[in-house]
Image (cartoon, helix red, strand yellow):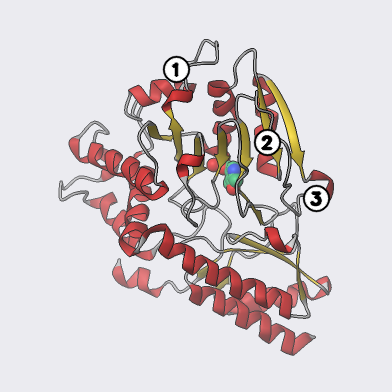
Amino acid sequence: MQTVLNAVKTHNFSAGPGILPADVLKQAAEACINFDNLNLSLLEISHRSKNFEAVMDESRELVKELLGLGSGWQVLYLGGGASLQFAMVPYNLLRTDGFAAYVNTGVWASKAIKEAKLIGDTRVIASSEDKKFTFVPKGYEIPADADYLHITSNNTIYGTQMKSFPTSPVPVVCDMSSDIFSREVNGNDFGLIYAGAQKNMGPAGSTMVAVREDLLGKTGRKMLSMLDYQVHIKGGSMYNTPPVFPIYVTMLTLRWLKANGGVKWIEGINNAKAAAMYAEIDRNSLFTGTTAVEDRSHMNATFVMTKPELEPEFDKMWKAAGISGIRGHRDVGGYRASLYNALPLESVQVLVEAMKEFEAKFA
Ligand SMILES: *Cc1c(COP(=O)(O)O)cnc(C)c1O
């Protein structure tokens, strides 16, 4: 196992599921064979065993700790991806006689809006759709009588990111799927935070939801059990069998983050990776960025080629350099380098070198 993992030298820029720390993968692999020295796999024991309950407790606690959440917060790990949260958020927070305010910053925000509209009165108060989501709207007014404001902190597909969060008179719900734990935020400024695990905190299959408990139970709606946060809270995030393996690997990843110095530590590295990446995009005559400079994402750097006919040549070069996963999203084209927490600065340097070599050869 050791030698196999050490032999992997691929620079993984995948947009999601994304790269995980090598050490986490090794521990996860071991737990599939022999978990906690039980001579049983993690995959074949009861989720109600004390060994798994410890995993659930720790993975919930680590979220609270890393987001700096105070009392009154609950952390859940649910199935259904971040996409199910597009529906669960309005179902649990949007009153039958109220309305919700949404900011539309891209594909994911648009999907969240689509679901919310099916549940209740949903108003889009700001949008960057008219400019193909290449910037983040700012300076919009948030209605003080809305049930909540929904925002998306990082626009994974178009490569924009909110550099600061709006001061809001109503609880802020934030989809942090692609930049959670990548930079310091004050979790207490929000009312609900959710994130599909597979971008920056673990494997696909579980979604983290952190919610202020006092916001719940006020919609006037009869609630289906599986879609009711209060039911999951009461069940200790085990109302039904939770996705045990993704939760375990998420716990390992959060442990890794904490042990190395936490969010502050990774933010420094993420800033260095983004600086190196964008410096080369701006310097290199064959590439250009696709978003407003002040809104550039530190997690997903999008760029296109000034001579698109050369794309096949560049593709050969980065593949030869051991790079994987920088092809752009099908909606945007070009390239996207995802710089998630577990991606080392060294990988960015390898990509920058490939871009330089490419320019030297073809410019
Ligand atoms: C990937 C992503 C989603 C969708 O996540 P699923 O777990 O596939 O449902 C939602 N929001 C954002 C910001 C994402 O990056």
Amino acid under disc 3: Lys
The residue sitting at 74% across, 73% down in the picture is: 312
- Tell me if residue 44 can be seen: yes
Amino acid under disc 2: Lys
Q: Which residue is mark 1?
A: 225
Side of 26 where 76 appears, left or right:
right
Who is closer to the viewer here, 233 or 172?
172
Q: Position of residue 152 (x, y in %)?
A: 62, 43
Q: Position of residue 160 (x, y in %)?
A: 67, 55
Q: Dot 2 lies on which element?
A: helix
For label 3, the crowd category at 10 Å Cα-Cα, with few meaning under 14, some 14 to 19 and many 20 or more, is: few
Q: Dot 3 lies on which element?
A: loop
Q: Position of residue 150 (x, y in %)?
A: 62, 35
Quick check: 12 above or below 192? below
The disc, 1 or 2, on the residue closer to the chain's N-terminal end is 2
The residue sitting at 59% across, 25% down in the picture is: 90
The residue sitting at 33% across, 28% down in the picture is: 238
Q: Which residue is mark 3?
A: 132
The disc, 2 or 3, on the residue closer to the chain's N-terminal end is 2
